[in-house]
Image (tube, rainbow, N blue to C red):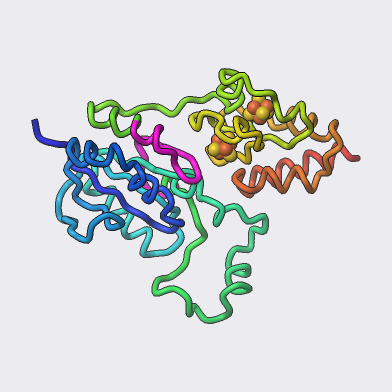
Amino acid sequence: MAKPKIGIYGLTGCAGDQLNILNCEDELLKIFDIFEIKSFVMASSATDEESSLDVAFVEGSVSTEKDLEDLKEIRKKAKILVAIGHCAVYGGVQAMFMDREWEKMYRKVYGKKNAVTLTKPLPPKPIASYVKVDAVLPGCPIEKEPFLKLAGLLAKGVIPRHPDFPVCAECKWKENECLLLKGEICLGPLTNSGCGAICPSLNVSCIGCWGPIEKENWEAEAFLLKERGFSTEDIVKRFSIFGGQERAEKLKKYLESKEG
Ligand code: SF4
Ligand code: SF4
């Protein structure tokens, strides 16, 4: 049987997801054995960009015209396109600014001339804003175990659907003491599971890097945090790290309306 052909690509991001694939040390030889890797520039400069792909893994947000061109090319040649990491799935921290005036903010940081990039910058967006995405693996960065599980399913021709229940469920399975009850701002109730509740298991509260669950009850969590004495500013700050601009603005308005 022919090996599935894959490509691993990076747009704008920190390359942490690609690095974590390389960090699969013990399993790396197996990955190279199961798949025919056509492009993975972080691992090898020998690439075949002309080849069609069974699966393309894409890290990073679309933040420049070059990103967009590359993404469209990848989509054209891949049967299955998988967004890996928070930047590709949700836009990443670069898409989380509170101010809608992106252009103005860009100039404030980089000056009037477009001197810092060789391509035209665009407001950072998740890849699904531009092309069809068949599967997602969130995380900042992605974790080894969920990646290997996903790669294994894809090798068998299965396209997995991301589970839609919160980190709290995984936290309960591990019998962790709830950090919300210990007086911390934990975003586990609003965040997609899959990471195995790594942070709360180490007594660190969740900041939401696996992205929001579909039916999140953020009003209830915000109310609970308010009840525990956190300020609107603290709550909105925590929500906005990975939660996105619109969500943070909605939450801010809601909390301010409750303050009367
Ligand atoms: S510690 Fe966080 S993730 Fe765990 S149950 Fe409490 S709120 Fe949920
Ligand atoms: S517990 Fe929360 S912040 Fe930590 S890895 Fe999981 S989703 Fe990300």
Instruction: Based on the picture, tell me whether residue 130 belongs to the magenta stretch.
Output: yes
Residue, x 62% and y 32% (percent of image)? 200
Q: Is residue 7 above or below residue 46?
A: above
Residue 12 visible within the image: yes
Quadrant in the rendering for residue 159: top left
Chain part drawn in magenta: 129-148
Q: Is residue 142 above or below residue 103?
A: above
Name of the residue lying farthest toward the right: 260
Q: Is residue 154 above or below residue 93?
A: above
- Quarter holding the C terminus? top right
Residue, x 43% and y 51% (percent of image)? 16
Residue 211 visible within the image: no
17 vs 133, nearest the viewer: 17
Q: Position of residue 146 (x, y in %)?
A: 40, 32
Residue, x 44% and y 41% (percent of image)? 142
- Quarter holding the N terminus? top left
Residue, x 59% and y 63% (percent of image)? 102
Name of the residue lying farthest toward the left: 1
Q: Position of residue 44 (x, y in %)?
A: 23, 57
143 vs 162, nearest the viewer: 143
Q: Quadrant of ligand 2?
A: top right
Quadrant in the rendering for residue 99: bottom right
Name of the residue lying farthest toward the front: 26
Numbered disc total = 0
